[in-house]
Image (spheres, rainbow, N blue to C red):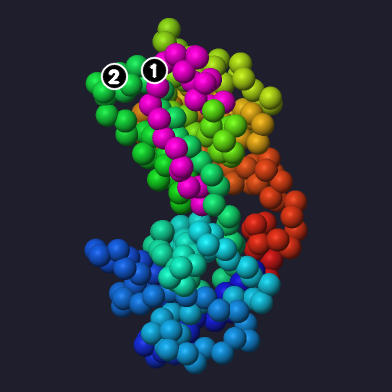
Amino acid sequence: MRILRLYAPALIGDHTLCYVHTNKAGSSCINDVELPLRYAHAGEALTDEKAAAAMTVVLPQQAVIGDGDFLSAGENNALLRWNAASGTFSVCRAGFLGVSEAVEIWTPVRTAVLTVSDKGSRGERIDTAGPELERLAFNMGCVTEKKRIVPDDPDAICGTVCEWASQGINLILTTGGTGLSPRDNTPEALLSIADKYVPGFGEMMRMETLKYTPRAFLTRSVAVVKGNSLIISFPGSMRGASQCFEAVSGGLRHAVETLTGLSSECGNHHHHHSAS
């Protein structure tokens, strides 16, 4: 679907393009002016006081945005999240909104991040890769509900992943334990509990990260399915995890939606599409 109108009386009426971001206080801003962001459907009157004191994004009538849903204006553009209680969007990622621009409605993906590290579990190493994966995943509408650090122990890895999968977490991102040292056990642990093996994720990571390091092929990152959960392992360094996430980000959301059945619900607001 496409944005039909951007209306803000405080900024003198209609706009074809605006830049949305947050200020130091965390308030939503449009073109450097602090203004709430709300939405309306085509044909709705925009004459009430709330509309006068906000930027209103006018969407097609079939658009349905639930509490906590995301409105994505595309890669590197604005990502907004709807708060039904306040009746406004929060700006998750700064960027542009434009009239006639294709946008998608994303249901939040229930996500968990597992850091696998002997030193991290003992408090001897600060985990930077886990928080980075959480940040990158949030930019794709994945909301991290659970985080944990476990040692490089197959039972600890399997136990945590199985626990989260049974609780309805649809995306589990692990970091660490994908190298060649004797204590690198993450791929074996995940394969031991897998219902399905998804080789393309690891293949893409190794292929794409060769741009950054000639040793990229040494990572043993894998992806598997357990029930309705997609589990993807990433390297233990922040840089490695970030580069590998970037390599697979293009298909990650679609994979989870296919796995959970959301992508087959045509016409439902959970199914994100960009048809006008």
| Mark nearer the N terminus (1 vs 2) | 2
User: In the figure, residue 204 lies in which quadrant?
Assistant: top right
| Residue 246 in view of the camera | no
Specify whether residue 160 is painted magenta. yes
Q: Are marks 1 and 2 in contact (CB under 8 Å)?
A: yes
Residue interval drawn in magenta: 140-162
Residue 108 or residue 248, whichever sits in front: 108
Q: Residue 139: percent from the left, percent from the top?
A: 46, 51
Q: Amino acid at mark 1?
A: Pro
| Residue 258 in view of the camera | yes
Instruction: Determine the CA span between mark 1 and mark 2.
Output: 8 Å
Q: Which residue is mark 1?
A: 151
What is the quadrant of the N terminus in the image?
bottom right
Residue drawn at (25%, 65%) of the image: 25
Q: In the displayed structure, does residue 177 sit left or right of residue 21?
A: right
- What label sits on residue 122 in the rendered view? 2
Residue drawn at (48%, 37%) of the image: 112
Residue drawn at (61%, 16%) of the image: 192
Q: Determine whether 80 is above or below 98 in the image.
A: above
